[in-house]
Image (cartoon, grey):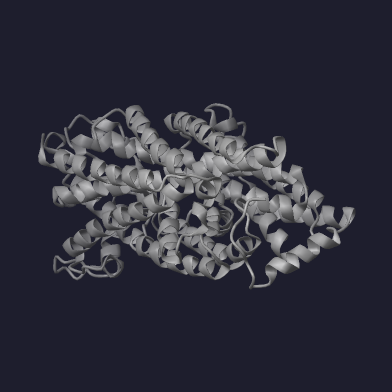
Amino acid sequence: MDELKLYTYIAVFGSFGVYFAIAWWARAGSTSDFYVAGGGVTPLQNGMAIGADWMSAASFISMAGLIAFLGYGGSVFLMGWTGGYVLLAMLLAPYLRKHGKFTVPEFIFDRYYSKTARIVAVVCLIIASLTYIIGQMKGVGVAFSRFLEVDYGLGLGIGMMVVWVYAVLGGMKGITYTQIAQYCVLIFAYTIPAIFISLQLTGNPIPQLGLGSTLADGSGVYLLDKLDMVVTDLGFKEYTTDNMGGTLNMFAYTLSLMIGTAGLPHVIMRFFTVPSVKAARSSAGYALVFIALLYTVAPAVGAMARLNLMNTIEPTAGQNMVYAERPQWFKDWEKTGLLKFEDKNGDGKVQYVADAETNEMVKVDRDIMVLANPAIANLPNWVIALVAAGGLAAALSTAAGLLLAISSSISHDLMKGVLTPDLSEKAELRAGRIVMTIAILVSGYLGLNPPGFAAGTVALAFGLAASSIFPALMMGIFSKKMSGKAAIAGMCSGIGITMLYVFQHKGIMFIPGTSFLGGLEQNWFLGISPNAFGAVGALVNFAVAFGVCKLTGDAPAHIQHMVENFRVPKGAGEAHAH
């Protein structure tokens, strides 16, 4: 066994061993443990766990890859995902914690005094969470298939089994402590290679500053200027000015990601695990710091990865790499099928250009950039192994949080809340575990047939949450007169129009060949892409809800009183069930 493989096995299976040990130590004994970790997590611990929950495979594996290929246009992911977190921390989390229930649909049931509203919220939550999990499963499959040198499907299967063990065993309690460990793994795995590569390219050990520095080769050229020159010479769009589909589309995309982020149930649930409203606010502050550590490094990782890739394929201007002399990392990624070369002109050299007719790099999967980056830069084997463990930690931590959100919405909200109210705690716990197992199997199947690359799939999930859950929560907190009927009409119309728009461009349930308008940009509404349409869906949701409220009358007086009560910033008890 070669050195890299040995290090990789140690890093990956060593980290898995830690996760399993934590899951066994923190296994859930009650529904309170299973859903909200008994409500006894400290703000610092919760901040770290939110950081891991937050930074999914899309953040770790895909985001820098997107920035590497989209350039400035990829910044919508940075702005949207972090900006949305601020919205969540300021506008939603403290009030939901003050209300003190386990899940988002439970809050919607109390606030809108309607079982129908609760069921609609459960459906919206499951649709958004399942779409999000597909992205995580793709990340797990990509990382496993490369680093364990197994088939993508088998890699996905191993990942599913790992998540099943610690999520089903531990519930929120096990997941919380596992996520703290996963945060430590993923942040080291992300920043250490970035520091190495920044030093190599610019002589500056701080990647955030390295991105704006001159190159270390003494030429005096700035890193971004050099990258612009390299990509435009090959016919690609300029890296620093390429905006994604126009200004309106970028604005809608950012807004959709922001409000979708604030409506994501698996992150909102984390705020119920702390003992008080004050602790909820503190943990939001800590989480923002932990998230910023990764998000401020991502643009540097993306730009440096793209420059290294271009320099490998064309070491000097006009001199292309000879395919037979390609480096080992190139061969390794070719085995996974995520990197493909086709010698179109038969000269044995690699031409990588923007023109599809003459481009011989027929496939460069965006999702490989972060994982391949250390190897492209010739970093030590232990760094490459660390990145593998980090990518898996990111994907597994978010998948676990999402599975818990799905499981709780079905076992707690649908079964105990609506269908069988006299369900015992033991039966509810068992139901939660069975539902989680089914959700893992479904998400695994979807991970084998994913729609698009990981971050794109995730953007769809944010759009669905943006158009359904976020407006219902905002109106529930800040509009005390909003009635149940109006909220249901808003949620249904918001998610309905968003799904219709996505399906007509991406295919019904993402099945190839069923898209009746195709992904063609000329068919986009005002030039807004399907991934960015959540913002429009949210506007429809608000408009329909306020319109129906005007027609059908305000919420009852006792509901208005309850809303006034949870807006007062003191006197919150523990998160409780019923």
558 vs 33, nearest the viewer? 33
Q: Is residue 468 among the parts visible in the rendering? A: no
Q: Residue at x 24, y 34 (%)?
A: 148
x and y percent of residue 567 in the render? Answer: 69, 69
x and y percent of residue 546 in the render? Answer: 79, 57
x and y percent of residue 455 in the render? Answer: 44, 46
4 vs 99, nearest the viewer? 99
Q: How many marks?
A: 0
- Is 43 placed left or right of 9 in the picture? right
In what quadrant of the picture does the N terminus appear? top left
Note whether 422 is above or below 35 in the view shown.
above
32 vs 295, nearest the viewer? 32
Note whether 260 is above or below 325 in the view shown.
below
Q: Residue at x 57, y 53 (%)?
A: 260
Note whether 124 is above or below 108 in the view shown.
above
Q: Residue at x 50, y 41 (%)?
A: 403
x and y percent of residue 566 in the render? Answer: 69, 66
- Is 202 placed left or right of 450 in the picture? left
